[in-house]
Image (cartoon, rainbow, N blue to C red):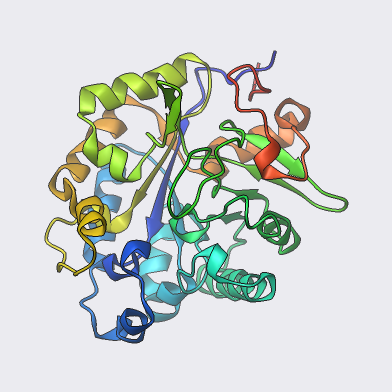
Amino acid sequence: MQRISRRNRHILTFELEEHFHAGRFDSPMRRRSWSLHQSRVRVNLERILGMLELQSTRATFFTLGWLAERYPSIIRAVTEAGHEIACLGYGHELVAAQTPHLFRQDIRRAKRILEDVTGQPVVGYRAPSLSITAHTPWALPIVAEEGFLYDSSVLPIRHDLGGIPDANPWVHRLSWDRHSLWEIPPSTMSIGGIRFAIGGGGYLRALSYPRLKSMLSRIEALNQPIVVYLRSWEIDAAQPRMQGTILSEFRHYLNLDKAAGRLQQLLADFPFGSVREVLLPICEQVPSALTQDSPDPAAGDHHEGSPQLTTA
């Protein structure tokens, strides 16, 4: 059985978006007023880049085309610091809220904007709010057709905005007639028969750090890459407060003051890199070790014994 060497780094990703882009607060009225909200993305990004520089760590930043149009200098600062820019779509539309045609237009537009701003190929995609589900089986083939090499959108959990509970939780390859795509799921773990997204978001903020580190170490012990994700606004306890449902407000604002400290601890305890830096060279060297062809992302085997990444 092929496995990833412990010498290899884990994968650190950020979703570069404003606090008012959060899917839990989305509405047509709020979208019309995006330009009136206080922008916090620059100050949050500068803080994140500073922490990464201190640990000599590179990361992948899934970025909105909407942001790149308005703040191209911010996006260039990411690439100039040696990090990877990937695509988060254009306007933070949930996948299920779009038709296949509109989805294709959205990611094509965002990819073009990001490549024009950075002058570099954009090969990775993540759906806003990780919103690819079993009800949008057309999404991943379109991502592949539009020239992306990898996706990191499928959460193998039950989730209100996204998730495919039976999906493969490990890095694997999806293939169709003429296209293929590497799927890089954010880290999850089964606890009491229920799988949780421990690799980021609310769980990174909600769990105590010793508990979080212990769970991530269990993934590392399986010789699997840890895949962490964090929205840029999650380190910003000073962001303006938005009104929504009690549950939305709880999940959005929970422990924002602790996220930056958790990130610093993760950077000190685990060796991270960007997707391009950590994974793509290995994919090119040993493509068969990662291949699990399946036209349906919901059909992947989710057991620990599924095909795994290797360099040795």
Write the residue at 67% across / 43% down: 297
Write the residue at 64% across / 22% down: 310
Left or right: residue 310 versus residue 265 is: right
- Relative to 6, is 183 above or below? below
Residue 80, quarter of the rendered image? bottom left
Percent across and percent down for residue 217 are 38, 19
Percent across and percent down for residue 296 are 73, 45
Task: Tally the numbered discs.
Answer: 0
- Relative to 143, is 225 above or below? above
For the N terminus, the quadrant is: top right
Write the residue at 66% across / 22% down: 306
Percent across and percent down for residue 7 are 50, 19
Write the residue at 45% across / 55% down: 161
For the C terminus, the quadrant is: top right
Percent across and percent down for residue 8 are 51, 25
Left or right: residue 301 versus residue 13 is: right
Left or right: residue 285 versus residue 153 is: right
